[in-house]
Image (tube, coloured by chain):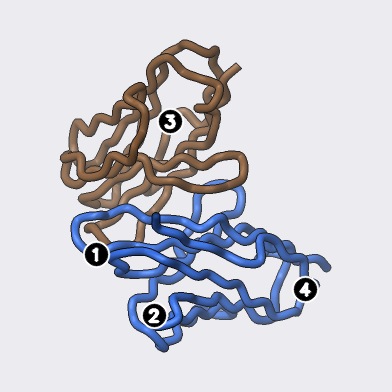
Chain colours: A brown, B blue
Amino acid sequence: DTAVSQTPKYLVTQMGNDKSIKCEQNLGHDTMYWYKQDSKKFLKIMFSYNNKELIINETVPNRFSPKSPDKAHLNLHINSLELGDSAVYFCASSPLIGQPQHFGDGTRLSIL
Amino acid sequence: EDKVVQSPLSLVVHEGDTVTLNCSYEVTNFRSLLWYKQEKKAPTFLFMLTSSGIEKKSGRLSSILDKKELFSILNITATQTGDSAIYLCAVGYTGTASKLTFGTGTRLQVTL
């Protein structure tokens, strides 16, 4: 009964490939997010969706494209992967804008 | 540019000690300050503070916000080895900007 679940947990792939990460929340929250955590543990917002609508896109390269088929799901597709994309990607959700966010366990992406 | 600065960056204490973690911020449209604990995977929510001077407490952890001086502290009394983690401070915004801006974290290690 995991609240915010991400798949896969680990992703190892070659430079130039395209990959997707999926996120689902069963908390009934309206707002979902993607964050990137680098090797120094710095967490930075990438995208935010409220009820399937994109509300934040924080200067992320066009190679990153989020998709929210419904308010319980927010997926992240990455084209033409680069070495600098290696990081842990966290999905999060909150009941409403401004309320505490609940995080998934992260997807560790490693680019060879 | 918005800034959230945590200090110290890392800390090693003995079990039973009391620790104080600091978070200062310079942001526009401040709404709230949040503390999270990150062990191996997902950051887990500890506190959300919106008003100055009102202490929030949960067991051995407590936190307070000073909106005039733009900082918050997180206190942990009688530390235990299970308190070892990275403690993250984040700022939330007013309006529709639902993102959190995180500090770089304080890595706390509690030894026997």
Work out whether B112 lies above or below B86: below
Secondary-structure class at tag 4: loop
**Residue A82 at x, y = what percent?**
50, 19
Q: Nearer the viewer, mark 2 or mark 3?
A: 2
| Disc 4 target residue | B15
| Disc 3 target residue | A7
Mark carried by residue B94: 1
Tags 4 and 2 on a common chain: yes
**Residue A67 at x, y = what percent?**
25, 30
Secondary-structure class at tag 2: loop
> For the residue marked with disc 4, what is the amino acid?
Glu
Q: Answer whether labels 2 and 3 touch (C-beta < 8 Å).
A: no
| Residue A1 visible in rendering | no
| Disc 2 target residue | B67
Mark 3, Cα crowd under 10 Å, few <14 / some 14-19 / many 20+, is some
> For the residue marked with disc 2, what is the amino acid?
Lys
Work out whether A53 lies above or below B94: above
> Which residue is at the front of the view, A57 or A52?
A57
Secondary-structure class at tag 1: loop
Instruction: Identify the residue at image location x=35%, y=22%.
Output: A63
Q: Chain of mark 4?
A: B
Tags 3 and 1 on a common chain: no
